[in-house]
Structure formats: structure tokens, C-alpha cells
Image (cartoon, rainbow, N blue to C red):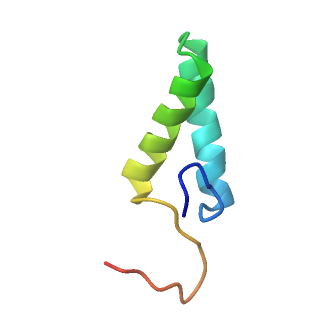
Amino acid sequence: MSRGDKSSYTDKQKRQAEHIEEGYRKEGVPKQEAEERAWRTVNKQDHGGKKSGSGRKDSH
């Protein structure tokens, strides 16, 4: 996955990042920094992009 490619993230993860980014923007954080912080938060919570669904293979 190339940097910036969000295709492996679930819709829920994308919504979470969007919501987190909005919070940072309200605090006056520049857009680029807010987006980066939001995705770092999602990655920390979920350990990176994952596809949801029954029978999904997990590497842990």
C-alpha cells in the first residue's frame, strides 16, 4: 500500500479519521497536520488498515 492510499481501511475507520480530523481543525490545527494526526490515531487504535468481515485472516 502506497503512502496516502486509504483503500484498505474500512468505512468505519475512514469516518473515525474524518471525525478526529474535524476536532483538530476546530482547535486550529492546520488541515494537513490534522489529517495526519487523525490517521495516526486510527492506526494506533486499530493497528493499521483492515478489511472487516467474517472469516478475515488476522496476522496476530
* Residue 11 screen position, x and y as percent: 68, 58
Residue found 59% across the figure and 73% down from its top: 52
Residue extending farthest to the left is 60
Residue found 61% across the figure and 55% down from its top: 5
Q: Where, by quadrant of the figure, is residue 40 drawn?
A: top left
Residue found 61% across the figure and 22% down from its top: 31
In the rendered view, would you say 35 is above or below 24? below
Q: How many marks?
A: 0
Q: Decide which of 32, 10 is in the foreground and name it.
A: 32
In the rendered view, would you say 12 is above or below 29? below
* Residue 17 screen position, x and y as percent: 58, 42
Residue extending farthest to the top is 28
Q: Decide which of 19, 3 is in the foreground and name it.
A: 3
Q: Where, by quadrant of the figure, is residue 60 drawn?
A: bottom left
Q: Is residue 33 left or right of residue 25?
A: left
In the rendered view, would you say 33 is above or below 27? below
Q: Is residue 33 left or right of residue 53?
A: left
In the rendered view, would you say 5 is above or below 51? above
Q: Is residue 21 left or right of residue 41?
A: right
Q: Is residue 31 left or right of residue 60?
A: right
Residue extending farthest to the front is 2
> Which quarter of the rendered picture does the N terminus lie within?
bottom right
Residue found 64% across the figure and 50% down from its top: 14
* Residue 25 screen position, x and y as percent: 60, 18
